[in-house]
Amino acid sequence: MTQRARNLFRRSRGLVLVAIVVAMATPAHSSTEHPLEPPDRSSPRATLATFLESIDTAWTLYTAKDPSVRGVFARARGCLDLSDVPPLVAIEVSAQSALVLKEVLDRIELPPPLDIPDAAEVAELGLTRWTIPHTEITIERVAQGEGDGQWLFSTATVARAEEFYDKVKDLPYRQGRLGGHIEALRYGTDATLVGGLVAALPPSARSEVGGMLVWQWLALGLLILFVLVAVVFAAWLGRRLSASRLPGANFGVYLLPLMLIATPFFGGFMILRLFKLPGEPIMWLRLVFSMTGFLGLAWIVAIMLTRIGELVVAYGFREARPLKKQLVRVMFRIAAIAVVTSIAIKALQTLGVPIAGLIAGVGVGGLAIALAAQSTLENFIGGIILYADQPVKVGDFCKFGDRRGMVEDVGLRSVKIRTLDRTIVTVPNADFAKLQLENLAERDRVLLRENLRLRYETTRAQLEAVMSEFEAMLKDHDRIAEEPLRVRFVGFGEYYLEIELYAYAMTDAWPEFLEIREDVLLKVMNIVERSGTRLALPTEIHYEGGQGASMSGSETGGLAT
């Protein structure tokens, strides 16, 4: 809150015409000939005339209980520049300031209307402000904002209205001016019960102390005490209810935030309608009550969105993998943060905090935080990518880089994999998402590919017989797929004839594949033994030359004898 606004609250005498200004959102009154024509605030002369005419008419309509007083009084309030006043109390401040300024203007000497600049003189002289002679009451041209181009009583004038009134309140009214608005409505209540209680109090209770009557200070103290007791009781009852097993126990967590939300409504009713309490403490108390209500609203929204997220996970993603459940929870938490931030911005707006500058500052700070937490954000985004693409999931056996292992956890920051040597490897999400991943668990079949080496002594007939039996054995195997399947002689090695076996085992489990491969290899050994040839092994043969010379070399034969 600005210093000018604090000065305004410091000397305020009362929140008057509350019954008039509670619903001031209706359009301003205008003539029946041109009902949509806005009030004239095109020059100091027009603004001063509009203000005095509107507030005099409003008082007349108020005393006659004419409902059209709302629009007329809104015209008078519209002549004040309230840019330094928190929006939360703008209606009350503008109503009080308008009535106080009317009291001042009814007592001081005003220049003749022709001596006050009109629109033509403003344009000719290039005026941007005009001050009533022998005073500090100033009407300025608004340069920006909602009232751009209009002439309004300046923010300094609005803030010092009570100060001006204190200096002239003992002066008589000018001829033709009635006044009496402030004195007629300074203190009191419209409530019959409260009015009767106040009338029964001793005269000392109706004396003024610090801008309020004694009984109003007492009412203020009781109001604050009641609100505090109600909040403490709601917190206690909520904890007891949540800890119990009674029906509706889950509702206990909502009691305290609901009480906080009710505080500004109850407090505002008591302050403005029942007691009509004036003064700076009331303004500050209303601001505190309002912030309490916003706090309760943000609290209950956060609780509800978190609970909704848990229900969605429990019923909509019951069988989902842990990463998906965690991401659902995170999305609801992000939604809660977004809503709570919106509520906080709205709360700051009611206090008159410049949101544009605040957002700019937060943006710069957010950039610094983002740079400092770059790796964390990168890993978080990597986790989102892993969730979207789903290359692996918990329980999958995969190949990542040049290593293999079983995925045990996919978190928001890293992936944990148990390798073949039973150790846990933690890989940041950003790095894991960049790897070429091979999800071995997603195979519907496992490739069985073996290269067999037969001795060079193997004849063509033996070779063809072996290959034929290999193919028949694979085709007859109940765990080997019929297609694709091949047995081919693929080449001459350094010391062997090479045959390739290519087939698919009908399983997606690695242990089961090992069993199938073992069975196939044992049958291969039997076929080779029956054929009369043998598997090739590297051998070394020594040749004895003349004169006792010897030479040795590798021969592509069988076993040397």
Image: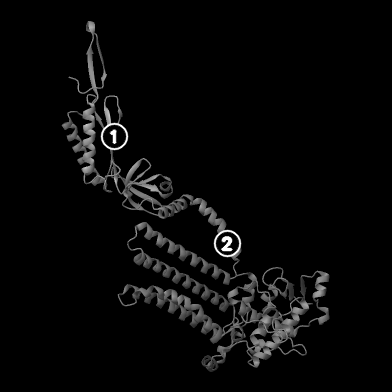
Q: Residue at x 37, y 66 (%)?
A: 310
249 vs 20, left or right, is: left
Q: Nearer the viewer, mark 1 or mark 2?
A: 1
x and y percent of residue 240 in the render? Answer: 34, 75
Mark 2 residue type: Ile
**Residue 328 locus on image (x, y percent):** 40, 62
Q: How many marks?
A: 2
Q: Is residue 518 above or below residue 453?
A: below
Q: List the residue tagged with mark 1.
A: 488
Dots 1 and 2: beta carbons under 8 Å?
A: no
Q: Of 115 and 518, which appears nearest the observer? A: 518
437 to 553, vertically: above or below: below
475 relative to 155 in the view: left or right: left
Residue situated in front as seen by the camera: 276 or 253: 253
Which quarter of the rendered picture does the C terminus lie within?
top left
Quadrant including the N terminus: bottom right
Tell me how far mark 1 sits from mark 2, CA to CA: 72 Å
Amino acid beneath label 1: Arg
In depth, the one of 177 and 245 nearer the eye is: 245
In the rendered view, does 466 fall on the left or right side of 389? left
**Dot 1 or dot 2, earlier in sequence:** 2
Identify the colour scheme used.
one colour
Q: Is residue 7 visible?
A: yes
In the foreground, 344 or 535: 535
Displayed quadrant of residue 271? bottom right
Residue 359, disc: 2
